[in-house]
Image (cartoon, rainbow, N blue to C red):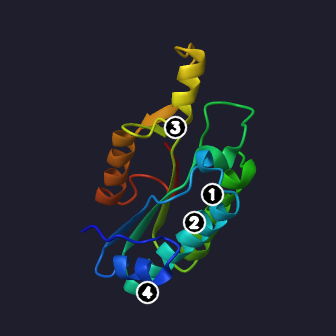
Amino acid sequence: EWLPGDVRDAETVRKACRGGEVAYHCAALVPMTRADGEFHRVNVEGTRNVLEGCLREEARKAIVLSSSAVYGCPPRMPLSETSPLSPLGSHGISKRLAEEVCTHYKLQQMDVTILRPRTLVGPGRLGIFHLHCRDEGLVQHPPQRLGVRGVAEDLRRVVASPGALEEIAQL
């Protein structure tokens, strides 16, 4: 069921959680928005609203889409769930703080899985890669990225198979 709303509105989010088994929290502001102060309100407080709504409405699971931005500029690739976190900028910091909110709810025995996808691309979702490809032409060494459909499939796996992914998963 589609319910229009704003993740910053706790009551709207709680209503959206009512009667649901699983909440997929994929709302976020992305770096291209250059929204500085709004990153915290959307990415951190929005996550808190979703998890609080799940807790109060007794949803059995929450899946939170974080970001590989929590790693900052990693010294080594590929990344794993245990790679050191060193977020850069307002977006990366807000995503790291949102993960701390998740940890708080996990301590209350809530089933929360955090997914850290690489850059998502897909219809209408090329973002900074559109600029890069336009300015640089074909990319010789393309960055690690995921298609939107791949992430959707990972979300389905998490729900279908408890334990399919750890509490935090690097996609």
The residue where tag 3 is placed is: 127
Image height of 168 relative to 51, above or below: above
Q: Where's residue 91, x and y in %?
A: 66, 53
Q: Nearer the viewer, mark 1 or mark 4?
A: 1
Q: Secondary structure at mark 2?
A: helix
Q: Are marks 1 and 3 in contact (CB under 8 Å)?
A: no
Q: Nearer the viewer, mark 2 or mark 4?
A: 2
Q: Residue at x 49, y 78 (%)?
A: 9
Disc with the residue nearer the chain's start (1 vs 4): 4
* CB contact under 8 Å: marks 2 and 4: no
Q: What residue would you read off at disc 1? A: 95
Mark 1 touches mark 4? (CB < 8 Å): no
Q: Which residue is mark 4?
A: 56
What residue does disc 2 label? 42
Sequence-wise, the earlier of marks 1 and 3 is 1
Nearer the observer, disc 3 or disc 4? 3
Q: Position of residue 142 (x, y in %)?
A: 55, 22
| CA–CA distance in space, label 1 to label 4 | 23 Å
Circle nearer the viewer, 1 or 3: 3
- Circle 1: residue type: Lys
Q: How many angstroms separate mark 2 from mark 4 (CA)?
A: 20 Å
What residue is at 62 percent from the left and 47 percent from the top? 31
Q: Residue at x 72, y 37 (%)?
A: 74
Residue 148 disc label: none
Q: Say which label, 2 or 4, has the lower sequence index.
A: 2
Please identify the quadrant where the N terminus is shown.
Answer: bottom left
Nearer to us in this view, 92 or 107:
92
Residue at disc 3, secondary structure: loop
Sooner in the amino-acid sequence: mark 3 or mark 4: 4
Q: Is residue 142 visible?
A: no
